Image (cartoon, rainbow, N blue to C red):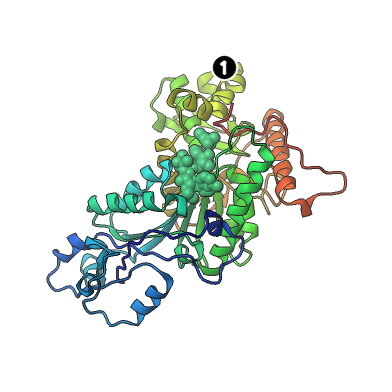
Amino acid sequence: MAFMAAGAAPSSSSAASALMPTRPETSPLQFFHAHAARRALFRSPSRTRRSQLVCSLDATKQAVQEQSPTVKGAAAGRTDCFGVFCTTYDLREEEETKSWKKVVNVALSGAAGMISNHLLFKLASGEVFGPDQPIALRLLGSERSFQALEGVAMELEDSLYPLLREVSIGIDPYEVFEDVEWALLIGAKPRGPGMERADLLNINGQIFAQQGKALNAVASRNVKVLVVGNPCNTNALICLKNAPDLPPKNFHALTRLDENRAKCQLALKAGVFYDMISNMTIWGNHSTTQVPDFLNARIDGKPARQVIRDDKWLMEEFTKTVQKRGGVLIQKWGRSSAASTAVSIGDAIRSLITPTPEGDWFSSAVYTNGNPYGIAEDIVFSMPGRSKGDGDYELVTDVVIDGFLWDRIKKSEAELLAEKRCVMPECMQDDELCEITEDTMLPGEK
Ligand SMILES: NC(=O)C1=CN([C@@H]2O[C@H](COP(=O)(O)OP(=O)(O)OC[C@H]3O[C@@H](n4cnc5c(N)ncnc54)[C@H](OP(=O)(O)O)[C@@H]3O)[C@@H](O)[C@H]2O)C=CC1
Ligand SMILES: O=C([O-])CC(=O)C(=O)O
């Protein structure tokens, strides 16, 4: 494994070129930035060292691949790479001596955004994938964010994380997603003033369709995809529909933040620390129709209702507080949850790569085909799952669903079916229109 580096600014092609639904014949640019080399260079004297240039535009990468691994780059007088970005080395020997796992390739879109700014440092530190798991980070941005991406990469470099073996930045998902084992799709257009919900769905639909196609073409065949950018359930559905060669089961939309918020509210009400709360399910859409399930939740191993003994609070206040937590936070902070979202992304990943504690489960919005609950097929719906720690999961069957819970589940299901009708008109029957009800809100919207 070698590090490759580059550093030219993007040229004039429009931002739209990064969002094209089909693969451009030549990618507008292709940058790979190397990180972590400096510290590594001084750790193992026996390591093979190489210094090499991989600067900027398309042809360069190919040219570099054809070059022998001897000193080039800075030594060759190029100015479009700098410092550690121009250095590369072979870490195989070091990996062997440290008994580290094989490097995991993780891509993030919206990598210059607020959530990523928290998440990247958790990933690089080993907090998410573990202290023996070296990581390569592939950052997807756009022409609009390219300079900011360089800044992010520089901060990662300056953090001297031993596990961070490679950082690359780019604006072409076909490049950035190549061989990735995890794709964290965070970037999405936020709703602007006066923008209809259906317009938002449409714009983001195009982004996630393109990214689905790119994943389908170049990602690892067992890539796990976690969609965070809103409206995340429907974006995940669009993404998986555009990736027919990948297992639909591997696509998730993030509802772990909602799960964490629900656990926090139950802990506060019960007067216990939140590690006492388990079996917390969020059903449905990551929107204000989501259903935080107090019927199956447990507090110190006992049913939450038995401990809290206040059904009115559970049915009304608890449910609303969780559904609208994101909006209240925006009112206070002036921006949406970023740090806690990043934490919850880490939690969601860890839930898939470590065995679920006996008897417990976690929530994730996943493809509904074959679900045991009777929820409509062919949507992405938050449900409870368990994992053996191998990246896969099974939906849990030992849940109780009463009339109250079922009614609410159906409401969230109806909302997701309506979203689907808007973004996939081919799924519409003659009498079905793309109509988004006023209930269809993101948690952060008023
Ligand atoms: N599921 C969940 O629990 C939660 C989801 N979210 C969602 O996560 C997403 C990211 O949030 P956050 O990081 O705070 O947002 P930021 O605004 O900080 O970053 C969003 C990124 O999205 C990218 N983007 C992609 N397409 C567009 C576009 N057409 N217009 C503008 N920006 C675009 C931008 O990067 P670039 O230019 O590089 O493409 C930008 O950096 C949002 O959709 C938010 O609603 C937030 C909290 C919780
Ligand atoms: O609406 C938003 O962008 C924020 C969001 O999803 C949340 O806080 O749950």
Q: Is residue 64 above or below residue 151?
A: below
Q: Is residue 47 left or right of residue 424?
A: left
Q: Position of residue 308 (x, y in %)?
A: 52, 20
Q: Is residue 331 above or below residue 357?
A: above
Amino acid identity at mark 1: Asp
- Residue for point 48% across, 28% down: 330
Element assignment for label 1: loop
**Which residue is at the front of the view, 395 or 417?**
417
Residue 86, picture quadrant = bottom left
- Residue 362 visible in image: no
- Residue 221 visible in image: yes
Q: Is residue 240 above or below residue 55?
A: above
Q: Report the residue marked by disc 1.
A: 310
Residue lying furthest front in this view? Answer: 12
Label count reads: 1
Q: Position of residue 234 (x, y in %)?
A: 63, 47
Crowdedness of circle 1 by 10 Å Cα count: few (<14), some, many (20+)? few
- Residue for point 43% across, 26% down: 333
Q: Position of residue 422 (x, y in %)?
A: 73, 45
Residue 382, picture quadrant = top right
